Image: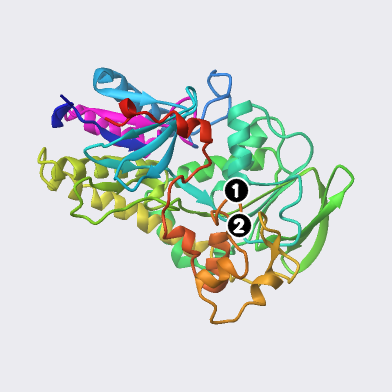
């Protein structure tokens, strides 16, 4: 006979702050949890440790260290009720409603039918494309931060950081503390043009102290932080890059080894299966994958999702989840004020600017499509979003340029990630119950 309903676990996908918070809340309520994480350890992007397993030497605010220590302690206290599977990748849901994921240690595809599922897979970065953004030596700020945390070493040679958002000064301060301060930080926004938003940020009680600590590090290392500045284009220059920048009303060239770019984050929702609210197996999103509100709010949002699952399963009332709406709204207000303070008008890229790296499609190719072309026609006739990333990177760009999301973002099909035929062949009957 199969397991009783009480023994069927809740599936939590993602081991970052939101997923860990959701899992801890569920096991503390007495339920069993299957927590899967694609990396070899929990932590997500913000709490990522070095690849060797040692504590990352990269500086993080004390608040984040305390929060993660508390979450891991909660998970450890209920270890008998939680099955943590690392190096396990969520693949989607098949036609029979089974949740599929690949255990990359054993190279097997596993199938489970959970009582409920919470998807906490974080956010993805966005960039505003410009000529040369696809060149070697150009990387997203988030990608560079992950490498810094995993290796404990900053990139070699001069580094320029450009784009918009709070991640720019955060990484700049971490690079400076790691021994390679960037040559400059170029923030596209002009916050002095939004004094009301700045006032709301200061009065919000949000992470303004953290921002002040970043500013102090940059000042101590004499890193220029320029607002109303941006990278216009990049071209190869020996073993580095020549980057044309606009700073204020003037244009100048900087010679660097690495150009790190970033223009905010958006929830990672590509292919996430969200059935109807009354479905037999409820599926909820949590953390930055539901709404990008920051690391502290992700912990609250993971708890909110868990409490909603508990209410759906008859283990609690909905009051617990509702009580978290006020602090989540404060985080939402902070993010809205920050977006207003850093807002900058979007300018159409030059014709030669690459939009889709996978298929080598430029802005000229996108502009050549009929103005009334549907999202499906953009994808199939323009060949945007047909490559390996399936629109994860170019999709947000095209949506910003044409106000049309690619259909890949609304048509979930498994596998969401590449999986070998050999791993699929090892999906056996005893792995489905």
Provide residue 272's location: percent of width, then percent of height.
39, 50
Which mark, by number, is residue 270? Answer: none
Colour mapping: rainbow
Q: Quadrant of residue 243?
A: bottom right
Provide residue 20's location: percent of width, then percent of height.
34, 32
Q: Which residue is mark 2?
A: 127
Residue 215 visible in rendering: no
Q: Quadrant of residue 77?
A: top left
Q: Quadrant of residue 112?
A: top left
Verify whether residue 431 appears in magenta.
Answer: no
Stretch of the chain drawn in magenta: 15-44
Residue at the (18%, 50%) spot, across then down:
322
Vertical position of residue 414 compared to residue 433: above or below: below
Position of the C terminus by quadrant: top left
Residue 405 in the figure: left or right of residue 4: right
Neighbour class for label 1 at 10 Å: few (<14), some, many (≥20)? many
Q: Which residue is mark 1?
A: 168
Provide residue 381's location: percent of width, then percent of height.
60, 70
Residue at the (28%, 19%) spot, across then down:
79
Residue at the (17%, 40%) spot, across then down:
310
Labels 2 and 1: the sequence-earlier one: 2
Residue 141 in the figure: left or right of residue 114: right
Of residues 108 and 172, the one drawn nearer to the viewer in this rendering: 108
Residue 147 in the figure: left or right of residue 119: right
Vertical position of residue 423 compared to residue 99: above or below: above
CA distance for labels 2 and 1: 13 Å
Residue 99 in the figure: left or right of residue 161: left
Q: Secondary structure at mark 1?
A: helix
Provide residue 127's location: percent of width, then percent of height.
60, 57
Residue at the (33%, 28%) spot, across then down:
431
């Amino acid at each position: 006979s199969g397991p009783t309903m009480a023994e069927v676990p809740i599936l939590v996908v993602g081991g970052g702050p939101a997923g860990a918070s959701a899992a801890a809340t569920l096991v503390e309520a007495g339920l069993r949890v299957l927590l899967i994480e694609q990396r070899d350890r929990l932590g997500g992007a913000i709490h990522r440790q070095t690849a060797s397993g040692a504590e990352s030497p990269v500086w993080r605010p004390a608040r984040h260290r305390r929060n993660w220590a508390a979450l891991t302690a909660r998970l450890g206290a209920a270890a008998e009720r939680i099955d943590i599977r690392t190096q396990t990748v969520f693949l989607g849901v098949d036609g029979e409603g089974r949740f599929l994921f690949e255990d990359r240690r054993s190279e097997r595809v596993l199938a489970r039918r959970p009582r409920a599922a919470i998807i906490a897979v974080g956010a993805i970065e966005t960039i505003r494309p410009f000529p040369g953004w696809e060149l070697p030596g150009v990387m997203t700020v988030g990608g560079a931060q992950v490498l810094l945390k995993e290796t404990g070493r900053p990139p070699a040679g001069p580094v320029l950081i450009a784009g918009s958002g709070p991640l720019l000064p955060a990484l700049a301060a971490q690079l400076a503390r790691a021994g390679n301060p960037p040559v400059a930080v170029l923030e596209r926004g002009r916050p002095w043009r939004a004094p009301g938003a700045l006032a709301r940020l200061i009065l919000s009680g949000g992470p303004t102290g953290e921002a002040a600590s970043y500013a102090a590090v940059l000042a101590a290392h004499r890193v220029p932080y320029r607002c109303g500045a941006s990278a216009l284009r990049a071209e190869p220059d020996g073993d580095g890059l020549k980057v044309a920048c606009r700073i204020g009303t003037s244009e100048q060239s900087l010679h660097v080894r690495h150009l790190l770019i970033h223009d905010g984050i958006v929830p990672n929702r590509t292919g996430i299966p969200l059935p109807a609210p009354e479905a037999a197996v409820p599926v909820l999103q949590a953390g930055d994958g539901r709404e990008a509100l920051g690391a502290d709010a992700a912990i609250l949002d993971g708890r909110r999702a868990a409490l909603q699952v508990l209410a759906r399963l008859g283990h609690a009332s909905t009051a617990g989840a509702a009580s978290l709406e006020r602090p989540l709204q404060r985080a939402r207000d902070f993010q809205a004020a920050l977006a207003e303070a850093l807002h900058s008008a979007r300018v159409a890229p030059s014709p030669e600017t690459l939009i889709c790296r996978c298929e080598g499609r430029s802005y000229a190719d996108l502009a050549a499509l009929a103005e009334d072309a549907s999202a499906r026609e953009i994808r199939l006739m323009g060949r945007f979003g047909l490559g390996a990333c399936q629109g994860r990177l170019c999709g947000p760009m095209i949506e910003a340029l044409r106000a049309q999301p690619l259909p890949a973002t609304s048509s979930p099909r498994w596998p969401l990630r590449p999986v070998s035929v050999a791993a699929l062949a090892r999906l056996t009957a005893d792995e489905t119950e």
